Image (tube, helix red, strand yellow):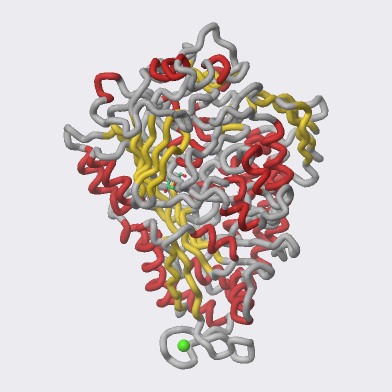
Amino acid sequence: MTTWLSTTAIAVLSLAAFGMGASAQELKGPEPAPVGKSLQSEGGVRIEHNKLARPEKLPNYREPEWVTKLVEAGKLPALKDRLPETPLVIDTTSVEGAGTYGGVIRHVSGARPQGWNWAAGNIMAWGGVEEIVSQCLVRNAPVWMLTPDNTEPLPQLATNWEWSKDGHSLTMHLLKGAKWSDGQPFSADDVMFLWEDNMNDPNVATWGRPGAYGEGTKLEKVDDATIRWTFTQAFPAATLYQMGYQKMCPGPAHILKPLHPKYNKEATYQSYADALSPDKTPWVTMGPWTVTEYRPNQIMLMRRNPYFYEVDDQGNQLPYLDEVQYKLSTWEDRTIQTVAGSADYANLEDPSLYLESMRQAQTPDFPAKVIWGPRSLDWSVFPNYSTVCGVRSERDKAIRELNRNLDFRRVVTQGIDRQALGQSLVRGPFIIPFAGGLHPESDFGSPDMAVFYPYDLPGAKAALAKLGFTDTDGDGIVNWPAGGPLGGQNLDINLAYNTLYPTDTSLAQSLVTMLREVGINLMLQPNNTELVNLIDSCQWDWVVRRGDRYVQAPVMNLDYLAPVAFNRPEWHRGTPEKPQELLPFETELVSTMRQIQSEPVSAKRNELLQAFNRKQTENVYQFGLISVPAAILVNKRFRNVPAGTPVVAYGWGEDGAMRERLFVPAAEQGKVPELAAGTLPGIR
Ligand code: GLA
Ligand code: CA
């Protein structure tokens, strides 16, 4: 392994020296990537995999008394008939213990739901909504709290699994006898519908694609409660992580199938994607709570799902909390309200709010607990590399070619003063320059895994001139070289960003000023809705955004990092008809990614990830900007908040904190009343 790595490292260096050509020699060479001071809270929970969440039959099961009354009134089946044969038992000994029923958690989201058809790519408002509404074969987020001996994903809809001797097949057992929140059976057919008619149908804009599971992978139903994967490679252990959040998360086939064009001649792919608008409540899920009410721009209400398949280690059906509220506001407001005590949970992730929030946290009656995690949030600019998707004009074509030129990417990355960018967001030790790519401060990371090109304004300007770009009309912006399709025009590049995040806006604005110094004119392209839609269209030049979900624990989103599927990565897409035209270093990234996907030993996988990252940062795959640590804020009313919960690691803090296990002691429940006390989804 070591030999393999060092040979590659040498190859990387010589290749790069060759590929860079004359112009890049104007620029300062790489330096060690900056490392920051850690703010991380000490003493995180650690628990064994087979203890935290395990399929197990318990002698007795219990539910809230008011639910038993509804059973007695004939409104719903008895608890034992609602639970699967073998429920998933969730440990409470590693936190404060078995909880009390009742109470509510008040969340705030800065996004809005598009609809409930997550299999068709609908966004459900983020902020932890998706992790409640959609459940997946496995669960990644709480992996952060596992002891290092086994950090495999946790069971969710699949309770256990085994590999064949030769490692080419993986048999997964699903929750047998489990039911959707409308009482209909959950089975392997739900999973097969997701795989065959969504993930394998390029017309459906779903999150997961078969490419994430390795080439030639097959999935089949064995019986109602069993599925089997067949892989070309042996023991592709990393694929297990791709069976979690957003990817292998089946929707209710009994509702979705009749809306899908394959089964319904009247339906179109558009009508399928739009069929489940957010006002269609209660929506049917497998999750701990189910959306029962939606008031646009105001609130989304969720009530306990009486069919939820988890119990605590005493046999109490989860969740403990009867209600979840999502106030529909802004992300900034989420932090402001949690700091003020009118909301219960925030990921402190907006650096401009750090100093004030921390000042308030010193006051004695501060309502929330603050848990700092690693430096796990980062922002980068992603240049669009696609020559086949969203290219509408000669101009688009020329911009994509420029983005694909490493000399140009060096100009840009070395024209950015990251220190100044960071200090303009928040003073102090929070922010450090980010090389792009993956996080050095993560389970697998090491400080030397990134190639960092330092700020060098004179070098960047000289290198840009060498590329033929000079300011021929004296307005401060360089002009395209004469002769080409854009000959003589100013170098204007669109920079898209999401105005829902104040940090993104502020970074975009600072970049305009900085790159103007280099001679590049950035034209701001603000979006007040989800960037995903713009990105899907491929009709953008550059986009600035937070990249954290791919880079902190990349093993769960490997397919986001390299062109292993036609729609991945987001900054280099092909189309179902035309695959991407890969750059030579991307071909190498893909082949390293294939090795990562099929490497069963996690230590070796980590070395490969480091090599992958050296390769992509050496080639400036993205323009990394800054990285910051983040904290979660949770109202002090709640018990069972696991010590050390990170904002983002294997998933977001909302799910990493295991909300179904949070509870509010009875005496404190009156502080925040339930809005729909005594009701269950769809039960009258
Ligand atoms: C948004 C928020 C994050 C987190 C995720 C969860 O992206 O900014 O803090 O809540 O949603 O999906
Ligand atoms: Ca000019």
Residue 484 visible in rendering: yes
Q: Residue at x 40, y 23 (%)?
A: 320
Between residue 357 and residue 172, name the one nearer to us: 172
Between residue 535 and residue 145, name the one nearer to us: 535
The spot of residue 434 in percent (x, y) is: 46, 55
The spot of residue 36 in percent (x, y) is: 40, 47
Outermost residue on the left side: it is 364
Placement of 486 over or under 83, stated as above or below = below
Q: Quadrant of residue 677?
A: top left
Outermost residue on the top side: it is 59
Q: Residue at x 55, y 14 (%)?
A: 80
Q: Residue at x 51, y 35 (%)?
A: 141
Placement of 1 over or under 304, stated as above or below = below
Residue 593 visible in rendering: no
Horizontal side, residue 29 vs residue 500: left or right: right
The spot of residue 435 in percent (x, y) is: 50, 56
**Which quadrant of the rendered structure holds the C terminus?**
top left
Q: Residue at x 45, y 52 (%)?
A: 378
Please count the marks in the image: 0
The spot of residue 441 in percent (x, y) is: 48, 42
Placement of 457 over or under 647, stated as above or below = below
Horizontal side, residue 455 vs residue 486: left or right: left
**Which quadrant of the rendered structure holds the N terminus?**
top right
